[in-house]
Image (spheres, helix red, strand yellow):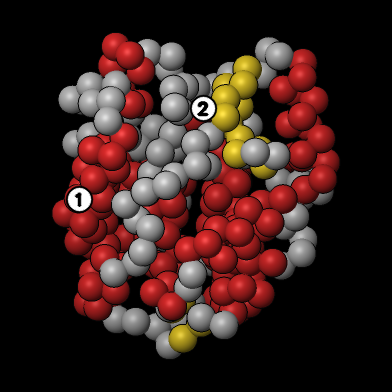
Amino acid sequence: MFDPFGDYALRGYLRNFENEKDLKIIKIAEHELFRAQLPAVLDFLASLKRIEYADFLEVHRILFSALYPWAGQDRKSILPERSISKGDVYFCHPKDCQRAIEQGLSYAQDKNLMIKNPGFVMGLFAYGHPFLDGNGRTMLLVHSELCFRANFSINWIATGKTAYLAALTREIEDPHAAILDDYLRQFIKEKIPRAQWLESINQLPGLDGVNQVFDDLGQYSDPDVVESYQAFERRRGLILPDKI
């Protein structure tokens, strides 16, 4: 069980407001909140001249604030010294969440780059992994808006969940290989009017989080964790802009 706060037995999964421990119930609640709040998120994104990091956080807050008290707060704010990984894949250090997301947002401002490398942008969002839960839904909505502004859409309904997640994992591991770009390219189509997003996004498989693979936790005070994280960073070989 993913228990970053260490108080699952007392406060339930990720300190949800109901102290609920049944993950199946939690995932149903997340999915229903996502569906209920989707129109508000789409209106919010459409109102923005430029999408910033604070807006990325706000999308998460709108979606999940009825379930989680920490909704809209990133890992730097709530778990600054904990590492999060899935198998051999490490997500970025909490202090770098904002840098990773901002790099993706900045890159996406160039419409030609966005349509050429939509997987690279999504990979940066995934590597940033700013939230304890709800990252996939949040970055999907932001990414869809960025695609729309670049005058195209990705036919997410036609993608395969297993194949997409495999490509996304490999993208995080090696952002230079264009693995997710190659996968998503076959699903690029003319942009879908925002009025149709509600129906198309609600049909996406896997948004209920069933069969979720849990993240592993470690402390950056542990030398072994630090070494594993640094080794993964070296293998990625992508330097975030203000680290250069």
Image quadrant occupied by the C terminus: top right
Q: What residue lies at 70% left-to-right and 39% top-to-bottom? A: 88
User: Which residue type carries mark 2?
Assistant: Lys
The residue positioned 69% from the left and 67% from the top of the image is 179
Mark earlier in primary sequence (1, 2): 1
Q: Is residue 130 above or below residue 150?
A: above
Under mark 1, the amino acid is Glu
Considering depth in this image, is 150 or 31 the residue closer to the camera? 31
Question: In the rendered view, does 98 fall on the left or right side of 59?
Answer: right
Name the residue carrying label 1. Answer: 32
Nearest the eye: 113 or 13? 13
State whether residue 110 appears in this view.
no
Q: Is residue 207 left or right of residue 198?
A: right
Q: Residue 123 sits in which quadrant?
A: bottom right
Query: Which residue has dot 2 on it?
Result: 76
Q: Residues within 10 Å of mark 2 (few under 14, many from 20)?
A: some
For the image shown, how many numbered marks are present on the structure? 2
Residue located 71% across and 14% down the image: 222
Q: Is residue 148 left or right of residue 37?
A: right
User: In this rendering, does residue 4 appear at all?
Assistant: yes
Please tell me whether residue 34 is drawn above or below residue 39 in the rendered image.
above
Residue 97: quarter of image:
top right
Q: Secondary structure at mark 2?
A: helix
Q: Is residue 16 above or below residue 172?
A: above
Q: Find residue 189 and name its label.
A: none
Give how far across and how far down residue 67 sits, in percent: 23, 34
Q: Nearer the viewer, mark 1 or mark 2?
A: 1
Tell which of 220 and 105 is nearer to you. 220
Locate residue 116: give its quadrant. Answer: bottom right
* Residue 195: x %, y % from top left: 22, 77
SS at mark 1 in the image? helix
Q: Quadrant of the N terminus?
A: top left
